[in-house]
Amino acid sequence: PKEIFLKDYKMPEYYFDKVDLNFSLGEEKTFVSSKIVVYPRIEGVSSPLVLDGHDLKLVTIKVNGEELKKEDYNLDSRHLTLSSPPSGTFTLEIVTEIYPQKNTSLEGLYKSSGNFCTQCEAEGFRKITFYQDRPDIMAKYSVRIEADKSLYPVLLSNGNLIEQGELEGGKHYVLWEDPFKKPCYLFALVAGQLESRDDKFVTRSGREVALRIWTPAQDLPKTVHAMYSLKAAMKWDEDVFGLEYDLDLFNIVAVPDFNMGAMENKSLNIFNSKLVLASPETASDADYAAILGVIGHEYFHNWTGNRVTCRDWFQLSLKEGLTVFRDQEFSSDMGSRPVKRIDDVSRLRNYQFPQDAGPMAHPVRPHSYIKMDNFYTVTVYEKGAEVVRMYKTLLGSQGFRKGMDLYFKRHDGQAVTCEEFFAAMRDANEANFHNFLLWYSQAGTPSVKVTSSFNAEAKTYSLKFSQEVPPTPGQQVKEPMFIPVAVGLLDSNGNDIPLTSLYHDGMLESISASGQPVHTVVLQVKKKEEEFVFSNISERPIPSILRGYSAPIRLESDLTDSDLLFLLAHDSDEFNRWEAGQVLARKIMLNLVADFQQSKPLILDAKFVDGIKSMLCDPSLDKEFIAKAITLPGAGEIMDMMEVADPDAVHAVRSFIRKHLASELKAEFLSTVESNRSTEPYVFNHNNMSRRALKNTALAYLASLDDPEITSLALHEYKSATNMTEQFAAMAAIAQNPGKARDDVLADFYSKWENDYLVVNKWFALQAFSDIPGNVENVKKLLNHPAFDMHNPNKVYSLIGGFCGSPVNFHAKDGSGYRFLGEIVVQLDKINPQVASRMVSAFSRWRRYDATRQAAAKEQLEMIMAANGLSENVFEIASKSLA
Ligand code: B3K
Ligand code: ZN
């Protein structure tokens, strides 16, 4: 396999102007004809034209209407090369034959539940026809589709429907035309038996846009929330960014077999049905929230991704980091901002931090890849979103908006790089962004230490920062980063101290320029070591550092436990309030892990129990915030902080603390469950979700006691639940403990929902993730369950992905979990390399564990590497993990 480097980027020698595609969809084979107007980048210069093509059968090729002979071109398994095309503009016509029915990779054109659909990003278009499959080739497309009318009554593609009609032999055709030029990764086609929920949106300039969400007829009732989400997103983008939709039609299609969440094809978004279909009975609050976020995300791509796209795939974060940031902001505005921030930061810590500290660590803009699909990562997406958020933190909302406006003004219709985004932000604000670009090129999570000191005489308070960026593969030495650190200071009553001025670099800088009191200041930490001294501080303050998590770093401070408890009780920044509790919990957990490893008795600090209790019983707090604040940091987060990760110890400690809290606060948890019941119909809004979140969290704590009284309570909740959120949480509570109650409730749930495959996936995931000892055997049995199918990514993610998320069973010391995954990866790779490569990633951090586990994991990675016909996708992850 060949590695591709950013530094080798070359502009294309040829551009495509107009592309006419013609699909004849068949049961055995499908014919794809293309007619492309080609012109050279430099007038008069003729060089070879290299087209990408994979798994294609070439039928004919014509240049300017004349069929080429074998000697006029060269065809290998990946390319079709015309060695001397005519000089100047010419037309290229190619006919290929493809077999979508046999395509199990779900990339290119394939069939899902009887319908045709496409997935072209990143490099799937080359599985449809020969093309310059790269995002800097932007062209205007027309698409004609013909197919059997009774099997495929609905035929969709990008843009506007221009023409349709009947053909002989029970066939029909349609013609679509997209007025916007686009890269081929945004091309889409759908054909099948689908029906639509129709609605409309009137843009702020008064244009009416038809909205259609397509699913099989029986699923239409479950598209109400998706339609609501789409309209909310369209409105939000107008209100917040002044961005209007640009066509008269917007389609969303839901398909059951899809490698990822969704795809932003121009005016024809294709979604994993998991992220469209919802009803209160079948989808949880988390599903509703995910649908809102992803429908928003794909819609927002219309401007950030489609109108302005990426020059090459290394720039992926240009569209993904920015669009994730936009969807995060959208969800915040639609729900609770602090809770959304807590969720996003937890995700970053639990998934991105480990990636940044492992063999797959890469910068937000990677320097190289073997298979681009492997770089749709939490680093490119979530850390990328944090980078965009830092511009906003530094420039303020208005400054950020100015930068966005300039970005669109300069680059609409272009394929650009991350520097162009940076330059728009800088130029619109005349900002000094010294070193900020390092966020795109240096991998690894910066570690920042801060120490504080108070000088009562001088009335000054100093914060001294020092930063370190750890080495990552291929990057041993790093430069200091530009880190925005939002800081506030609390007085002894817990109020924010008005900040007036500070000394920095020997200069006295005024903070409150407008004379208004300032409670949070953004310090710009740019050097390896740097000091900021606040003046006019008359008592020793408690600092609230990195408010709102203003930079994606690991922060270490000299705050004492009592400072942390104080912040937990008083910080006006809700994120940092939660964070204070987490810092404390992480400290306690790490200490107990050490005790456990030395076979010392585990004792939980009574102050911590009191802290949890006072939050649980504080009626002034938002309930979802309480639910988050009383939830312990994840096992992954704790293992990530250990020298040698010890899953058994972390699991034992986490279970011990949960049980201890449950028994100490049993009365409080019980009353929390009781007072948060409701008989009202399900509503998706923050208040209702908060109530359910708190109730379910309390019930989960109680169930850890494995007490028959609690089991009956949970069973009662299970039976009386009127929505999936509460029903599933009650089942999960019961399923914490092995035994008859667990077996019965799992069986009951399955028989209730066996006809709803999305619900059955939840049932798979719950069992797979279980920490019941020896669970690998149960998961193996589930592989043979009639509802399981290795061809469907959602099922694989639920059952196999779920299992890999379990610290105890996947990392079982006897190696059984690793052996299980090793075998699956080899089988799965033959069916779907993208999904297999996601699964093999569970091995990537094998060096973090003890010698026994290391040996067991390494053996599996080596076995995988030796497998015949290994895909490039799996090869890249496995080989980099072993390197
Ligand atoms: N852009 C797509 C991701 C495509 C992944 C290709 N392997 C979805 C999204 O981020 O919106
Ligand atoms: Zn995206």
Image: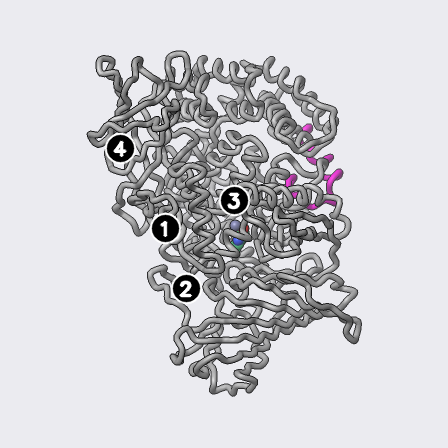
Q: Nearer the viewer, mark 1 or mark 2?
A: 1
- Please tell me which of labels 2 and 4 falls first in the chain: 2
Please state which amino acid type lies under the numbered disc 1.
Ala
Please tell me which residue is depicted at 65% across the width and 71% down the height of the picture.
Answer: 23
Q: Earlier in the sequence, mark 1 or mark 2?
A: 2
Helix, strand or loop at mark 4: strand
- Ligand 2 within 8 Å, label 3 CB: no
Residue 361: x and y, percent? 38, 47
- The mark lying in front, picked from 1 and 4, is 1
Residues at marks 2 and 4 touching, judged by CB atoms closer than 8 Å: no
Q: Nearer the viewer, residue 138 or 471?
A: 138
Task: Indicate which disc residue 423 carries.
Answer: 1
Mark 1 and mark 4 lie on one chain; the one further toward the N terminus is 1
Mark 3 vs mark 1, CA separation in Å: 18 Å
Real-space Cα separation, disc 2 to disc 4, in angstroms: 41 Å
Image coords of residue 609 (percent x, y): 48, 15
Tell me the residue that label 2 is attached to: 1
The CA span between labels 1 and 2 is: 35 Å
Residue 241: % across, % down: 52, 44
Instruction: Please tell me how crowded label 3 is: few (under 14), some (14-19), or many (20+) other residues with Cα within 10 Å.
Output: some
Q: Quadrant of residue 22?
A: bottom right
Residue at point 71%, 23% (across, down): 678
Q: Residues within 10 Å of mark 4 (few under 14, many from 20)?
A: some
- Tags 1 and 4 touching, CB below 8 Å: no
The part of the chain drawn in magenta is 738-764
Q: Main secondary structure of the magenta part?
A: helix
- Specify whether residue 559 is in view: yes
Question: Given the image, on which type of amino acid does mark 4 rest?
Answer: Ser
SS state under label 1: helix
